[in-house]
Structures are given as C-alpha cells and as structure tokens.
Amino acid sequence: MSWNEQGGDKDPWGGRKGDQAPPDIDEALKRLKEKVTAFTGKRGGGKGSGFGGGMGSAKNLLPIVLSGLLILWALGGVYQVDEKEQAVILRLGEYHNTVGSGLHWNPPLIDTVTTIGVTEERQYSTRGLMLTQDENIVEVALSVQYNITNAEDFVLRLKTPETSLKQATDSALRHVVGSTGLDGVISTQREQIAIATAERLQSLLDIYSSGINVVKINIEDARPPNEVKAAYDDVIEAREDLERLVNEAQAYSNGIIPEARGEAQRLREEAEGYSSQVVSKSEGEADRFLALLAEYTRAPEVTRERLYIDAIEQVMTDSTKILLDTEGGNNMLYLPLDKLGQGAPASSSQRGSETNNEMIDRVANEVIEKLQRRGNQVQSERRR
C-alpha cells in the first residue's frame, strides 16, 4: 500500500504525517537501498510471484529514485565564494554572470562555476639576456606583482593568461632595455626602467583584455654576462675614481673661490678708499689754493712774505745742520741741531747745560734777526 492511500500513515522518508521534523537523508538513502534490493529479489523470485506484481513494485519505487536523484543534484549546485574571490558563471558554455562573496547556488551540469582570487597579489619572476641601446649584452632579472581586476576577462579572453603575461613582460622589458644604454640599465636608471616597463606591460595587457592589473615591477638584478664581468668591474672602479676626484676638486674649488672673492673684495674696497682719499686731498688742496689766491689778490706782499717764511721753515725742519754767516766776522757758524737736540749727558754739570741753552737762544735770535733783515731788504728792493 502506498503512503498516500487511505489508511497510510507513513511517508516514503520514514516519518509520520504528524511529524514536522525534516527528512533524514541518510535514512532515506538506506530505505531506498533496501527497497531496490527487495525489488530485485522479487523480480527474480519463485513460482508464486507474477509479472503484474513486479510491475507494481517498480512503479512504486520510481518516484523515490527520482526524488533522491533530484535532491543530490540540487545539493551539488551549492557553493560558497570567499571575500577575496569572484565566481564566473558559464551557462551551457556561454557567459552568464559574475558573482561575489557569499553562498550561491547554480544548477549542476548546466552551469560551470570558475572561482578566481581577485584581491590577492600574485608575483611572477623572469631573467634573461638582452641587448642595450649601445649594443652591449646585459642580464636582467625582474619580478612582476599583479592582481586580477576583471574575472570575466581573465577567464574568457585568454586561454592561458599566465603565459600571455610572461610573453608580454619579456616583450616590454626588451623594448625598454633596448632603448637604454648599458650604464643606465646597470646603475643609474633602474627605477626609470622599472616604471617604463610596467607602463608598457599594462598597455599590452589592456590590448589583450586580459583583466590583469600590474601593481609594480622590481628590477632585482642587472649585470653584464660573466664573461665580461671582470672588465666591467674595472670600468666601474675607474668611474668611481673619477667621481671621487671630481668631488675633491669641487671641494677645493668651494674652499678657494670664496677666499679669493673675499681678497678681491678687500682690495677693491682699499682701492676705493685710496681713491676717495686722493680725491678729497686734491679737492682740499684746490680749495686751499683758491683761498690763498684770494688772499694774495688782496695783499700780495704779505702773502708772498708768508709763503717764503713757510717754505724756509719747511726746509729747515728737515735739516739737522745749519751754517750761519754772521755779520762782522769772517767765520761761518755751524749749528749741529741733531746733537744739540739730544741734550746734555746725565754726568755733565749744571753750568754746561746753561751754556748750551744760552748758545741755542743766541743762535735762534740771530737767525730770526737775519731773516727779518733779509725780508726788509727784499721789500725795499721791490719798492724801488
């Protein structure tokens, strides 16, 4: 008797009608196995079994088998996508949609689910020999850090995205290195080469619609081949010596040039000071001469006499010996002013000191009188 017939109180899952508990899958599969076994045994049974009875049991078992298969099929379509992943759904081989993180269900055998990690950074490394712009061979090793920005393009556009990435990296790197000299590749332009390679690689991947985003490229090593490494090391050492000597010369230049500039500035200021002094002195002499000219215009004789006396005074000041022609005598008077100016020794007597002072006073008076008489004679002659 089937479970839905009158009087039946059990369902095919082993529960009663009044029970609200969910069916137990393991128990249902166990009962299904028992019924299949019983059906197989009855079909090959003894004399009392008939064909009509076998057909009835098969009809009763078919819904149970179909229900079990349907449950298994439905459970096979449940899957979960992590936070860092995306799932690309293909329905009957054609793109359907892309789902994010969470619990999802798609019909098995109809939909194909491909899960891709889109937030994690992946890394790819390569090394190879290539030719530089100046026709030198260099060995370059680099690593590429990348992630997936478009799961659909990554899955559907390229058959092998990683292989395409490697080939595009080699192409971009060889193009950039081929446009750079050996010195730049090995030492001075590594950062610029990495940036240029990343930009060119990203443009190639965008053309391919690969769904790959290049995060960063690191130039890990760049060196000449081992066969010429010793010679290139000598070149590098010579270049370092050149830089050292240039730095030393620059340091010496920085020390000597400010000193020379300071000395030049000092000489320039001294020259300007001397020029100002000479000009000022010349201007003062000119002003004095103009003032003397005005006085000479008003009193020529007095001015002439004053100039003569000033000239004699200036000449006599620089002389240490004086010869006087005294009137009323035939002898010349010799005055050693340098000796007289030194004074008497400490051991001389007071009388000797007084005699010297009297002599000096007398001689001075005679000189003054003679100068006055000569001046009077000159004036008398001019008046005549």
Image (tube, rainbow, N blue to C red):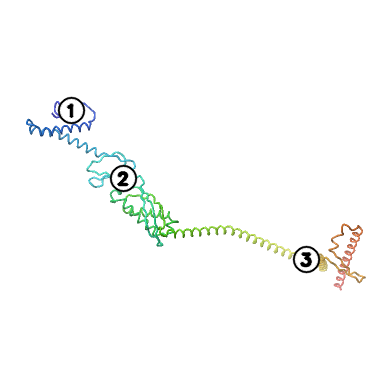
For the residue carrying disc 2, how many other residues have a C-alpha within 10 Å: few (<14), some (14-19), or many (20+)? many
Left/right of residue 280 with respect to residue 259 in the rendered view: right
Camera-side mark, 3 or 1: 1
Mark 3 is on which residue type? Leu
The answer for how far apart the CA atoms under marks 2 and 1 are is 47 Å
Q: Which residue is mark 1?
A: 10
Image height check: is 40 above or below 119? above
SS at mark 1 in the image:
loop
Q: Residue at x 87, y 59 (%)?
A: 345
First in residue order: circle 3 vs circle 1? 1
Is any atom of residue 46 visible in this view? yes
- Number of disc labels: 3
Left/right of residue 263 with respect to residue 247 in the rendered view: right
Which disc, if any, is residue 116? 2
Which disc, if any, is residue 292? 3
Quadrant of image for the C terminus = bottom right
Question: In x, y percent, where is residue 131?
Answer: 38, 60
Image height check: is 107 above or below 261? above
